[in-house]
Structure formats: structure tokens, C-alpha cells
């Protein structure tokens, strides 16, 4: 009797979406961990590596809303996700043929911009799908973090064994796998799909202070995390913490984030999204002030576990807030606006922290605490302008 394998369509829409989330951050995980090492092996200076890293972020600030508008006007968000995944995969494979700074800059920018567009549109589409079906968006998004962490662990072992040469096959392989799995994604909407929310059909109709302030506040709260992404390992190494312990601490933050994603649906049933954002902001204030005192590993364990609140809870709360107050017609555009704010604040924060870390070391976390205060105040101001209904 011949072996008959089930087709991707045999799995439910949420299973296929979870599978795509699982591979979504494989290439970014490799890039965040080992991209700098690979660029240096290709002859780039530290300044050039900084330019290669920064340019895609600056470009996405400009194109996010454009991509969102295209995705919202398409027959289905799935089309944009598949096309963006294919562009990123082809560009990542072309990195091996790029020569010199300008070639790497151009191809890397295409890869990362398309990759960012994929994440933005998928989040909008998955939110709308789970709202319509009664599913759990947090559980879907959690599989992205699981895949990210597993990729970092596997890539670390391979790069340690084979050196920087292992980076490109891993990075391009992750992008190609993402493109392949994209074809198994379900349709997120169609002519017979009911609208998940009523409300504004143009982004300008919702741009009131009560709506913009939580998004800007969340962007500021996430900007405070920039010191983690760029300098946390360096600061801990200066503090004398062993490299393997640093790896475990960073992984703990990802595990805590995943746990919150899985549990978020139960939290939201009891609290408004903006109140949860305030909880994330208050936790951030405590976390960053404590980190400024250079605590030992025993204290860093609970502080890293707070990442589930300061980032995981904040991310899920703002996603729910955007989903509640926008319609299907502007879902991806709203995500693009949020990402534009987040990336803009993060770029500014990264530049600022870069100046602070050399002069003040771990005390730079106090600047992150100031950002957390500002972000929390913005969300509180929104609640005063328009309290949650019910």
C-alpha cells in the first residue's frame, strides 16, 4: 500500500499559521546572533557593519505604510506575505555573490525590508483570523519565539563548529524555508469572509490622540529594550558574568516572553489592553532601575523573567488595542504605523545608548527607566482622554 502524505491544506488554518510563525524568525535569529561576525569576515569595518544594519530600518520607516496599504487592498493578505517571503529568500541567497560594501548593503537591505514586511502583514492577518474564529493569537505568535530560540541554539553550535562560513547557509536556508512554508498558509480573507471589526476604513479616521498615544507609548517602552538588544551581553561580560551564563539569561527572557504569549488570552478577558500596557510600563521602570545597580546572577534571573511582562505583555496588549479599534480595511496599515513608530524610537534609542554605555556602563539602564516612565505616562494620558468601554 503506497504511503500517502497529507497535504498542507489538510491542517487547519491556525496550525498552518503556527507552522509559518515557527520558521518566520529563523533567519533573523541567525542574523541577530552572528551577522556581525560574518560581515567582518567579508572585510567590512565596524562603521560599515553599522551602516548595513541601520539602513534597512530607516527604509522600513518609509515603506511600512505603503506596504500595509498594498496588503490591505489585495484580495487576501496572504498574497503579500508570500511575495515578500520570496523576495527575502532570493535576496538572501544572492548575498553569497555580493562583493564589497555597496553590494552587501544593497542586497542585505532588500532582504531585511522584505522580511520586516512579512512579519508586519502576518501579524495583522493572524490577528484578524483569530478574532473571527475565536482562536488565540498569542499562542500562534508564541511559536515564533520558540522557533527563534531553537534556531539560535542550533546556529550557535554550527557556527562554533564551522566558523563564520556557516552563517550564510544558515541565514539563506532559514529564509528559503520561510518562503516554502508561506505557500501552505491559509486564506485569511475572501469575498465571503465576514469583517472581524467595524470601524474606520481609512487610517486617517482613527488618528486621534487617544489612539496614537498608546501606540507611541508602546514604541517608547519597546525602545527602552534597545539597550538589551545591542549592549546587554557586553555589559554583563564587563560585569564578569561568564559567556555561557549570559546565553542562559538571554534565553530565559525568550522563554518568559513565550509563556506570556500562551497565557495572554486569559489575561485579556479580565483587563483592558491599555491597563495591561501600563502594567508592562511599570514593570519596565522597576526592571531597568534594578539593572542599573549591576546585580548578580541570582537577581538577574527574576529580572530576566520580567521580560515576559515588559516586552511580551506589552506587545500582546498593543496588538489587541490596534485590532479592537481598526477595521479589516486598514489592518496592515495600522500595523505598519505601529512598526514605524517602534523602529523610529528604537533607532534613536540605540544611538543614544551607544553614547551612554561607554561613559556610564550599566547606569545607562536608568535612561531606559526614563523611557519607561514616558511611555507609561502616554498610555495613562490616553485613558484619561477616552476610558475603555464597559
Image (cartoon, grey):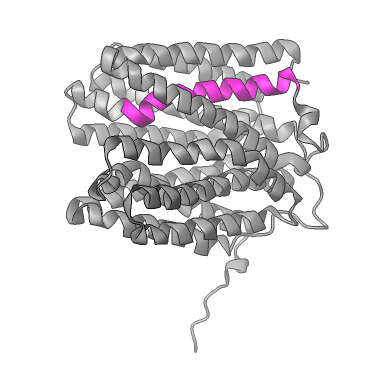
Magenta stretch secondary structure, dominant: helix
Inspect this view and state whether residue 306 appears. no
Q: Residue at x 19, y 26 (%)?
A: 241
Measured along the vertical axis of the image, is residue 290 above or below residue 69?
Answer: above
Q: Position of residue 73 (x, y in %)?
A: 76, 50
Q: Position of residue 306 (x, y in %)?
A: 42, 24
Q: In this rendering, would 33 be left or right of 161?
A: right
Magenta stretch: give its range.
208-231
Q: In this rendering, would 265 be left or right of 152?
A: right
Q: Residue at x 74, y 15 (%)?
A: 387
Q: Residue at x 55, y 25 (%)?
A: 219
Measured along the vertical axis of the image, is residue 169 above or below residue 244?
Answer: below
- 224 magenta-colored: yes
Snapshot quadrant of residue 365: top left
Q: Position of residue 256 (x, y in %)?
A: 42, 33
How many numbered circles does the render carry?
A: 0
Q: In this rendering, would 384 be left or right of 6?
A: right
Q: Residue at x 49, y 87 (%)?
A: 2
Q: Position of residue 329 (x, y in %)?
A: 78, 43
Snapshot quadrant of residue 16: bottom right
Along the viewing direction, whichever of 93 and 299 lies nearer the viewer:
93
Inspect this view and state whether residue 58 appears. yes
Amino acid at each position: 500500500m503506497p504511503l500517502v502524505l497529507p497535504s498542507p491544506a489538510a491542517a487547519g488554518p491556525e496550525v498552518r499559521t503556527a507552522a509559518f510563525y515557527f520558521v518566520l524568525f529563523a533567519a533573523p535569529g541567525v542574523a541577530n546572533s552572528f551577522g556581525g561576525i560574518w560581515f567582518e569576515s567579508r572585510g567590512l569595518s565596524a562603521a560599515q557593519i553599522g551602516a548595513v544594519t541601520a539602513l534597512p530600518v530607516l527604509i522600513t520607516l518609509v515603506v511600512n505604510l505603503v506596504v500595509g496599504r498594498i496588503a490591505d487592498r489585495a484580495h487576501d493578505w496572504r498574497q503579500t506575505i508570500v511575495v515578500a517571503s520570496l523576495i527575502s529568500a532570493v535576496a538572501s541567497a544572492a548575498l553569497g555573490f555580493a562583493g564589497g560594501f555597496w553590494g552587501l548593503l544593497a542586497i542585505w537591505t532588500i532582504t531585511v525590508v522584505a522580511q520586516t514586511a512579512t512579519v508586519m502583514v502576518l501579524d495583522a492577518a493572524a490577528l484578524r483570523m483569530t478574532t473571527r474564529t475565536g482562536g488565540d493569537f498569542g499562542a500562534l505568535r508564541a511559536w515564533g519565539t520558540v522557533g527563534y530560540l531553537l534556531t539560535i541554539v542550533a546556529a550557535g553550535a554550527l557556527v562554533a563548529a564551522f566558523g563564520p562560513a556557516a552563517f550564510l547557509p544558515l541565514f539563506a536556508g532559514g529564509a528559503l524555508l520561510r518562503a516554502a512554508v508561506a505557500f501552505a498558509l491559509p486564506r485569511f480573507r475572501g469575498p465571503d469572509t465576514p469583517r472581524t471589526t467595524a470601524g474606520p476604513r481609512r487610517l486617517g479616521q482613527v488618528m486621534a490622540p487617544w489612539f496614537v498615544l498608546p501606540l507611541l507609548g508602546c514604541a517608547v517602552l519597546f525602545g527602552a529594550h534597545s539597550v538589551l538588544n545591542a549592549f546587554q551581553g557586553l555589559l554583563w561580560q564587563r560585569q564578569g558574568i561568564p559567556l555561557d551564563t549570559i546565553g542562559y539569561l538571554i534565553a530565559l527572557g525568550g522563554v518568559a516572553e513565550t509563556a506570556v504569549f500562551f497565557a495572554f488570552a486569559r489575561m485579556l478577558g479580565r483587563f483592558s489592553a491599555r491597563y495591561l500596557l501600563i502594567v508592562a510600563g511599570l514593570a519596565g521602570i522597576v526592571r531597568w532601575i534594578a539593572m542599573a545597580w549591576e546585580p548578580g546572577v541570582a537577581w538577574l534571573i527574576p529580572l530576566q523573567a520580567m521580560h515576559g511582562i515588559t516586552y511580551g505583555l506589552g506587545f500582546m496588549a498593543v496588538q489587541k488595542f490596534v485590532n479592537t479599534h481598526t477595521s479589516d480595511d486598514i489592518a496592515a496599515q495600522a500595523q505598519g504605523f505601529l512598526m514605524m513608530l517602534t523602529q523610529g524610537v528604537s533607532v534613536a534609542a540605540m544611538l543614544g545608548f551607544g553614547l551612554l554605555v561607554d561613559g556610564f556602563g550599566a547606569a545607562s539602564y536608568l535612561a531606559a527607566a526614563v523611557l519607561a516612565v514616558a511611555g507609561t505616562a502616554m498610555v495613562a494620558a490616553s485613558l484619561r482622554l477616552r476610558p475603555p468601554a464597559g
